[in-house]
């Protein structure tokens, strides 16, 4: 017994103890690290089973080897068994973690595939709804507006009939504008944000021409430098068509005025759209750019769409001035990014097709 006790302090026993502590430390460190990984806690029980199974299996193998070796050194046998149990447990932890990661990755891949299928299904439905709006609802709205416009040219109409037809024409045109805005929102949902250099000067000039054609009584003043370039896409025109239309339709004067100025400020461009309307009521200013479920809301989808597109281009829009003399909306857009190839051609503005008013 004394000899065996002394053997506990032998170099072989102490060396085995040190080696075992290394594996124990690795086992404890692995458990600590596992708690900080993205492995779900419900996998821990299976990992624990691998730890116990690895420890028992490796210990059993070494127990057979110890029996065959016929060694009588109890201290050595104890050190050997402790080492075998620790190595088996550490190996089980490693195998359990690898299996848990493989299961987690497989689940994540399945979820990603499901999300991709759902996104594709949603895209197809959005395309279907967009086509339905364009070919069915929008055409019907154009027919209503067109016939009302023809009838309004009849000089023999009495005042009551003419007023009713004017209401039909106005509401048909409003419905057309809403449908167009909904189409753009569908496009922003289904299409990725692929920004490219766009000629803002051409976009504004085209939209102001459209404004003059639609509203013959409007007075337009513009100060727009040539070849101002911003990062956007083909929906950029919808930002300003909505702002211009909003400026005219909320102005009750006989000759509404719209003033547009463009200022380049380093990495950004500021476009200010001013009108001489009655101003924005104080209780409407806080939710001016929010989407409203109220179909009678005064600004409809227009300004919500403007904000959505501005944010799509990493820009912003805000009401900078308002009062009895009119309002000013300011749109801030980013200029061409410095990382963009300077030799890349600037996209010329291709006006978004719009139905006849």
Image: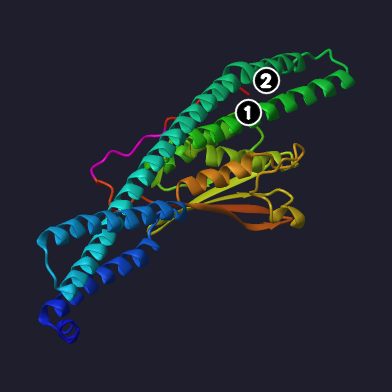
Relative to 213, residue 230 above or below: below
Crowd class of label 2 (few under 14; some 14 to 19; many from 20; radius 10 Å): many
Name which residue lies at 75% across and 36% down. 295
Q: Secondary structure at mark 1?
A: helix
Q: Which mark is residue 141?
A: 2
Can residue 227 be seen from the camera position used here?
no
**Percent coordinates x, y for residue 128 in the rendering:** 54, 21
| Quadrant (top left, top right, bottom left, bottom right) of the N terminus | bottom left
In the figure, is residue 320 to the left or right of 51? right
Crowd class of label 1 (few under 14; some 14 to 19; many from 20; radius 10 Å): some
In the figure, is residue 145 to the left or right of 92? right
**Percent coordinates x, y for residue 352 in the rendering:** 49, 29
Q: Along the polypeptide, which appears first: circle 1 or circle 2?
A: 2
| Quadrant (top left, top right, bottom left, bottom right) of the C terminus | top right
Range covered by the magenta-colored residues:
343-349
Name which residue lies at 41% across and 38% down. 112
Majority secondary structure of magenta residues: loop
Relative to 79, residue 164 above or below: above
Contact between marks 1 and 2 (CB within 8 A): the answer is yes
Name which residue lies at 36% across and 67% down. 32
| Structural distance between the alpha carbons of marks 1 and 2 | 9 Å
Q: Nearer the viewer, residue 226 or 231?
A: 231
Name which residue lies at 89% across and 21% down. 160
Relative to 138, residue 215 above or below: below
Q: What is the count of numbered marks?
A: 2
Q: Which mark is residue 305?
A: none
Q: Secondary structure at mark 2?
A: helix
Residue where numbered disc 1 is placed? 179
User: Which quadrant of the structure image shows residue 12?
Assistant: bottom left
Relative to 19, residue 276 above or below: above
**Percent coordinates x, y for residue 18 in the rendering:** 19, 76
């Amino acid at each position: 017994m004394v000899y065996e006790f002394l053997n506990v302090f032998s170099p072989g026993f102490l060396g085995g103890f040190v080696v075992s502590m290394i594996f124990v430390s690795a086992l404890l460190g692995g458990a600590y690290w596992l708690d900080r990984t993205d492995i779900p806690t419900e996998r821990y029980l299976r990992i624990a089973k691998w730890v116990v199974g690895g420890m028992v299996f490796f210990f059993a193998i070494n127990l057979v080897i110890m029996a065959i070796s016929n060694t009588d050194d109890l201290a050595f046998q104890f050190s050997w068994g402790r080492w075998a149990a620790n190595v088996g447990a550490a190996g089980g932890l490693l195998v359990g973690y690898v299996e848990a990661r493989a299961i987690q990755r497989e689940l994540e891949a399945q979820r990603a595939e499901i999300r991709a299928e759902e996104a594709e299904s949603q895209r197809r439905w959005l395309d279907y709804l967009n086509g339905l709006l364009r070919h069915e609802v929008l055409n019907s709205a154009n027919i209503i507006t067109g016939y009302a416009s023809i009838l309004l040219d009849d000089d023999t109409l009495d005042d009551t009939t003419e007023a009713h037809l004017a209401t039909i024409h106005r509401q048909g045109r409003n419905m057309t504008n809403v449908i167009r805005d909904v189409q753009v929102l569908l496009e922003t949902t289904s299409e990725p944000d692929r920004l490219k250099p766009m000629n803002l000067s051409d976009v504004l000039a085209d939209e102001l021409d459209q404004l003059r054609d639609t509203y013959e009584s409007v007075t337009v003043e513009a100060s727009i430098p040539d070849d101002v370039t911003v990062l956007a896409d083909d929906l950029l025109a919808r930002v300003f068509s909505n702002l211009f239309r909003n400026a005219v339709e909320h102005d009750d004067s006989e000759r509404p005025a719209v003033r547009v100025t463009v200022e380049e400020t380093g990495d950004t461009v500021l476009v200010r759209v001013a009108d001489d309307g009655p101003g924005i009521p104080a209780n409407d200013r806080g939710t001016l750019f929010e989407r409203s479920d109220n179909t009678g809301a005064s600004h409809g989808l227009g300004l919500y769409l403007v904000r959505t597109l501005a944010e799509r281009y990493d820009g912003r829009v805000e009401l900078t001035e308002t009062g009895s003399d009119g309002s000013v909306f300011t749109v801030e857009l980013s200029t061409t990014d410095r990382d963009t190839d300077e030799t890349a051609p600037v996209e010329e503005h291709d006006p978004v097709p719009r139905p006849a008013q």
